Image: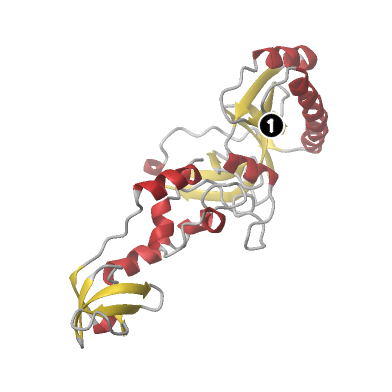
Amino acid sequence: MATIIGVRFKEVGKVYYFDPDKHILKKDDKVIVETSRGIECGTVSMPNKTVPDDQLNYPLKKLIRIATKEDLATVAQNKEKEKKAFDLCEKKIRHHKLDMKLISVEYTFDNSKILFYFTADGRVDFRDLVKDLAYVFKTRIELRQIGVRDEAKKLGGLGICGRPFCCSTFLGDFQPVSIKMAKEQGMSLNPVKISGTCGRLMCCLKYEQDAYSDLLKKTPKIGAIVSTPDGKGTVIDLNIITGQLTVSLHKSPDAAAHTYTVDQVSIIKDGQIRVDKAELERLKKLEKN
């Protein structure tokens, strides 16, 4: 058995696991650990927990120390440096006339590296920009191009539901979201209605997908041929949540359609949920990260 702690380096970021090295830690404690980026200050999101050794895929790095007042002062100083570095980098971007948008700047705890995050429509030749920044800051410079979802996560804001973005409040990682999910949930394939502020498919489409997938296993789809108490018919509309089906009966196709519940019909030949090529081509940009 091994004892681990979970540490986050961003308010809503991925959780990384470390060996607490016999320290007993509480949630929200500040700690100093070694990461692939160097020495960093993080926040404990999961206190000491014992797990079987076979659940660990790699050897854990040990906690260096619980953050001191001096460490927290360094973090605060780095935040101030980041603001100045952001302003200077924006000036350099304008000077070099680069087609890119600076999103945020991060100093590593030990000041061994400064990371500049930006968005751009395509590839950007920022070699001269890196040289200028390295000359000014006298440390290692790294520019990282991120997607519009990452931009929304970093900047935050309000979604169309009126609540703060899920990605900037509790989603540690982005989950794959597809046009098919929106189709299966009976949503209009209108980009305005199914995309978030970032311009990509809403993350919340993923939340209820398992429930919709389960309901679809027992609910006839539009176009399905079913047997009803009044004879055979074709499903022309449905409400997957309530289980109500609108069926056009074959014996009287010109008459008004009848309404049944899922329990009142049996499937003879099920329909299929498809996104045609024209729709997919028009909306495929919404699936990108």
Colouring rule applied to residues: secondary structure
Quadrant housing residue 234? bottom left
| Residue in view at x 72 percent, y 20 percent | 97
Q: Quadrant of the N terminus?
A: top left
Q: Quadrant of residue 8?
A: top right
The residue drawn where x is 60% and y is 29% is 145
Q: Is residue 71 above or below residue 224?
A: above
User: Can you give x and y, in whole percent of width and height, for residue 250 in the image?
Assistant: 19, 79
Q: Residue furthest bottom?
A: 229
Relative horizontal placement of residue 128, taking residue 150 as reference (left or right) = right
Q: Residue at x 78, y 38 (%)?
A: 72
Residue at image mark 1: 101
Residue 135 in the image, given as x and y percentages of width and height: 76, 11
Give the camera-side residue of 31 and 182.
182
What's the amino acid at mark 1? Answer: Lys
Residue at far front of view: 254
Quick check: 83 left or right of 175? right
Across the whole image, how many numbered discs are drawn on residues?
Answer: 1
Q: Residues within 10 Å of mark 1 (few under 14, many from 20)?
A: some
Residue nearest the observer in this picture, 185 or 156: 185
Q: Is residue 147 left or right of residue 261?
A: right
Q: Is residue 82 left or right of residue 277?
A: right
Image position of 136 with respect to 1: above or below:
above
The image shows residue 194 at horizontal and vertical percentages of: 52, 56
Question: Of helix, strand and loop, which one carries label 1?
Answer: strand
Q: Nearer the viewer, residue 81 or 219?
A: 219
- From what the image shows, is residue 72 above or below residue 202? above
Q: Residue at x 67, y 57 (%)?
A: 164
Residue 239 drawn at (x, y percent): 39, 74
